[in-house]
Image: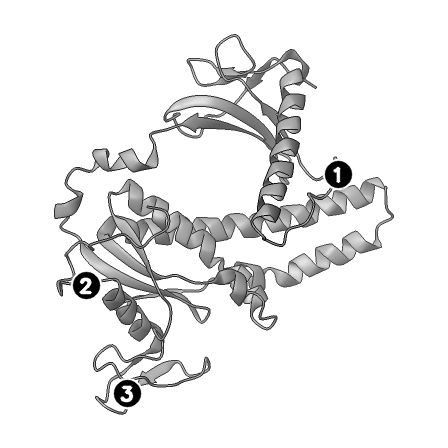
Amino acid sequence: MPATTVQTLADRLSKALKRSLQMKDLGVPVGFPRFKTPTRWHSIQVRQYETHRDVWLDEDGKHLHVPAKLGRLLKIKLHRPLVGTPVTAHLVLRADTHWYALIVCETMPQDERTIAHPLQAVCAHRALGLDVGLKVFLADSDGGLVEHPRHYRTSQKRLAHAQRTLCRRKKGSYRRRKAAREVACKHLKIARQRRHQHFNVAKRYAEHYSRICVEDLNITGMVRNHHLAKSLHDASWGAFLGILEEKAERAGHRVIRVPARFTTQKCHRCGEHVQKSLSVRTHICPCCGLVEDRDVNAAKNILRAGAPPSGTGQDAAPDELRSPRF
């Protein structure tokens, strides 16, 4: 192995130990960093990205120079042009038996990105509220619904068949390694399907709305419900909201997280609290007679909660950002 790759492994171990000790000093219940087997990680980090150093890319963008122990010259397909200053690179082997070169670049700091959008305060796009769920993946305050594809649930039978095949194979045999690759490929396909859907939905909303209000969900506490944990992980709300914030920031827009308390029970028209269980999918207000989908009603409450405290217009910018990423 190249010397710089061994150094990066030592850096990872040092960071893991320091973070563990820091969290213990803060009183957070954390354990000691667990042992990582050699077969757990399938990546090689090449530290110094610079011409005639550890790794660098040719001007034609078709060849990657690496140390001689790793092949010296690798033919690659460049996915997109590099943005920023390249710092380091990782060579990763995915479950589909393809190698990927991940080049890490240093970009503009987050607090300076507003320079790229000087007209952000006078954006002509409207505001929108989003409510994520399990029956439908997402409902907006305009009445739009995004169906839940349930990628893991639809692939669960094929995945279970592949896992049973893996369990029948003898440990240490070639057929067991082959069956393990089949299981890993199915997991990789599910993850890619889910991520592709997240990017498509997030891009559509981030580019057409100036202020997007979402719930500040405690997903870590929600997955402790063993009846809903699998469905919550399948929806992957946390990953979607992270992608949505990144897409909105690139478009010069904002994502605001508001408290999730009473957003589903409250009537957005009159403010009356209407108690209903998860099985009740329609909001019926006994006071004003409003009949609406419960997710759409929740999205409108989220939009109102994310509005400026002193204004009533939907196009006005909030007085302060409530998103922890800004």
Q: Please state the horizontal and vertical placement of residue 240, each as a whole percent of the image.
A: 42, 53
Query: Which residue lies at the image location 30% right of the left edge and 43% below the top edge?
Result: 249
**Location of residue 259 with respect to 191 vertically, above or below:** below
For label 2, the crowd category at 10 Å Cα-Cα, with few meaning under 14, some 14 to 19 and many 20 or more, is: few
**Location of residue 55 with respect to 145 vertically, above or below:** above
The residue identified by callout 3 is 285
Q: Is residue 197 visible?
A: no
Residue 307 found in image quarter = bottom left
Query: Which residue lies at the image location 19% right of the left edge and 63% below the top edge?
Result: 309
**Residue 37, numbered label:** 1
Q: Please state the horizontal and vertical placement of residue 154, each as a whole percent of the image.
A: 56, 63
Give the farthest residue toward the bottom. 286
Of the two numbered discs 3 and 2 in the rendering, the one whose residue sits closer to the viewer: 2
Q: Disc 3 residue type?
A: Cys
Quadrant of the image containing the N terminus: top right
Q: Disc 1 residue type?
A: Thr
Report whether 202 appears left or right of 67: left
Mark 3 in CB contact with mark 1 (< 8 angstroms): no
Could you tell me which secondary element the residue under label 3 belongs to? loop
The residue nearer to you, when weighing 306 against 135, is: 306
Q: Disc 2 residue type?
A: Pro
For label 3, the crowd category at 10 Å Cα-Cα, with few meaning under 14, some 14 to 19 and many 20 or more, is: many
CA–CA distance between discs 1 and 2? Answer: 53 Å
Residue 263 found in image quarter = bottom left
**Location of residue 78 with respect to 165 vertically, above or below:** above
Q: Please state the horizontal and vertical placement of residue 39, each as a whole percent of the image.
A: 73, 37
Mark 1 in CB contact with mark 2 (< 8 angstroms): no
Q: Please state the horizontal and vertical placement of residue 152, each as a whole percent of the image.
A: 57, 60
The residue identified by callout 2 is 309
